[in-house]
Amino acid sequence: MAPVGLPPGFRFHPTDEELVNYYLKRKIHGHKIELDIIPEIELYKSEPWELSDKSFLPSRDPEWYFFGLRDRKYPNGCRTNRATRSGYWKSTGKDRKVYSQNRPIGMKKTLVYYQGRAPQGIRTNWVMHEYRLDETECDNTMGIQDSYALCRVFKKNVVISEIKRQGSCSLTTAEAALEMPAASQANTDNVHIGSSSCANEDEKDDTAWMQYINDGGGEASCVALAD
């Protein structure tokens, strides 16, 4: 059930460390979470534009959080099935470690939603951050760290509007990040485009955005643009 009686002005803006070390870790181990703010849903049974209705957060917030069981694409494989009825979520860039007190506690994957079927899908502005728990953070090592993922979903143009409204970072700066040539990002740690010869132009176009969304595009922070 959705939480009752959220106070006026309530906003939910947890850090990566808080999402993994508190919410996801407690969910996986079956421990109580103080506020029932993140619902468990079958994430890939819904299109991204349908997710706001499933969120426990106020609809005016431009991002939503969900727990989801890891759905394996193949019975004996480790790949997750991320296909929806109308499209699919495609991984962009490389997974990044989430740290707590200089100790890796999980991984963060960035995905972009494409409408249609691969490889002819059309890229949209929907972005997902998928968080996984590191096996070293589990009470046992029987693979339970892969039982659940915590996902944060947002739409890029909504986030830009939120940044402009809050005035914490100028829209000019954000636009400059979007227009930054891919070549200038080649040596950064936060952006990685696969070196496979199969990489297409859509993946290259994501480079400028990755500098922004990899570090939490929903947060109105100039630091994310500078990393």
Image (tube, rainbow, N blue to C red):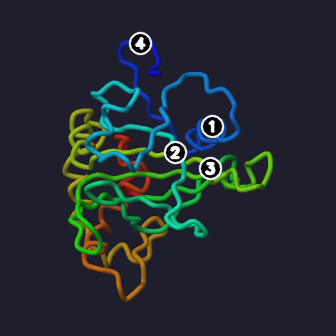
Tag 1 secondary structure = helix
Residue ID for mark 3: 147
- Amino acid carrying label 1: it is Lys
- Amino acid carrying label 2: it is Leu
Q: Nearer the viewer, residue 34 or 224?
A: 34
Residue 178 drawn above or below residue 198: above
Quarter the C terminus occupies: bottom left
Q: Nearer the viewer, mark 4 or mark 1?
A: 1
The Cα–Cα distance between marks 3 and 4, rounded to whole angstroms, is 32 Å
Q: Are marks 1 and 2 in contact (CB under 8 Å)?
A: yes
Q: Earlier in the sequence, mark 3 or mark 1?
A: 1
- Amino acid carrying label 4: it is Pro
Residue 187 drawn above or below residue 108: below
List x then y, in percent, for residue 115: 23, 60
Residue ID for mark 2: 150
Q: Earlier in the sequence, mark 2 or mark 4?
A: 4
Rate crowding at label 2 as few (under 14), some (14 to 19) or many (20 or more) other CA atoms within 10 Å.
many
Rate crowding at label 1 as few (under 14), some (14 to 19) or many (20 or more) other CA atoms within 10 Å.
some
Residue ID for mark 1: 27
Q: Are marks 3 and 1 in contact (CB under 8 Å)?
A: no
Q: Earlier in the sequence, mark 4 or mark 1?
A: 4
The Cα–Cα distance between marks 1 and 2, rounded to whole angstroms, is 9 Å
Q: Are marks 2 and 4 in contact (CB under 8 Å)?
A: no
Rate crowding at label 3 as few (under 14), some (14 to 19) or many (20 or more) other CA atoms within 10 Å.
some
Q: Residue at x 41, y 85 (%)?
A: 196
